[in-house]
Image: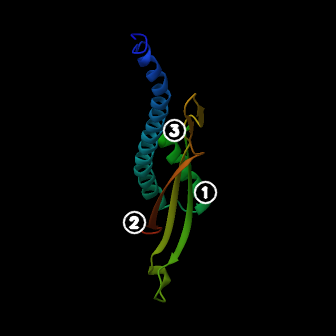
Amino acid sequence: MKILNNKDGQMTVELAVLIPVVVVVALIAINLMEFIDACAAFDVLSSDTVISQAVSPSQGVDTGALCAQLEGDIASGLQREGSCSVSVRCEDQGLAEGSLTNCLLPHYVKYICTLKFKPWPRNLNLPIVSYGAPLELSHEKSIVVDMFKSGVVI
């Protein structure tokens, strides 16, 4: 009768079942914290970079070159080359409507900065559970500025 009530090794079995689940939950939490940290740093850095460089661009610099320069500056400031990539595109919002004096009207440009985060590891197969992360998570920040009036941010 004592053999039927023997519970030796039950904790080992419970631990063997629980550890893979804990590992997967920990990986999800770590990737989520890294993504949130990258998004917070990206929001501040992209706003500061666009406001400081795009509001009053150098003479003779076209928007394509300015976007490439902004991408490089944001990526180097973020310092996450392995897990994050940055892209910047701009949309010309045109002149404000309503008057014949176009030289006095604001000229709005919308800069769309995108952060793409690649979680690690991509796939993990454990005996009880499997973990598959998305290819990448993206976060977008838009800033509208008046291109030729320094300090005007919409």
The residue depicted at 57 percent of the width and 46 percent of the height is: 136
Q: Give the label, 2 or 3, closer to the camera.
A: 3
Q: CA distance from mark 1 to mark 2?
A: 21 Å
User: Residue lying farthest front?
Assistant: 1
Asked if labels 3 and 1 touch by Cβ distance under 8 angstroms, the answer is no
Q: Position of residue 2 (x, y in %)?
A: 39, 10
96 in relation to 114, above or below:
below
Q: Amino acid at mark 3?
A: Arg
The amino acid at mark 2 is Val
Could you say which disc has been placed on residue 65 in the image? 1
Q: Nearer the viewer, residue 5 or 88?
A: 5
Which quadrant would residue 18 be assigned to in this image? Answer: top left
Q: Which residue corresponds to mark 2?
A: 153
Instruction: Identify the residue at horizontal 51%, vertical 38% (top origin).
Output: 80
Crowding near the residue tagged with mark 1, few <14, some 14–19, many ≥20 C-alpha atoms within 10 Å: few
Residue 7 image position (x, y, % from top left): 40, 15
Residue 86: horizontal and vertical position, in percent?
A: 55, 49
Residue annotated with mark 3: 80
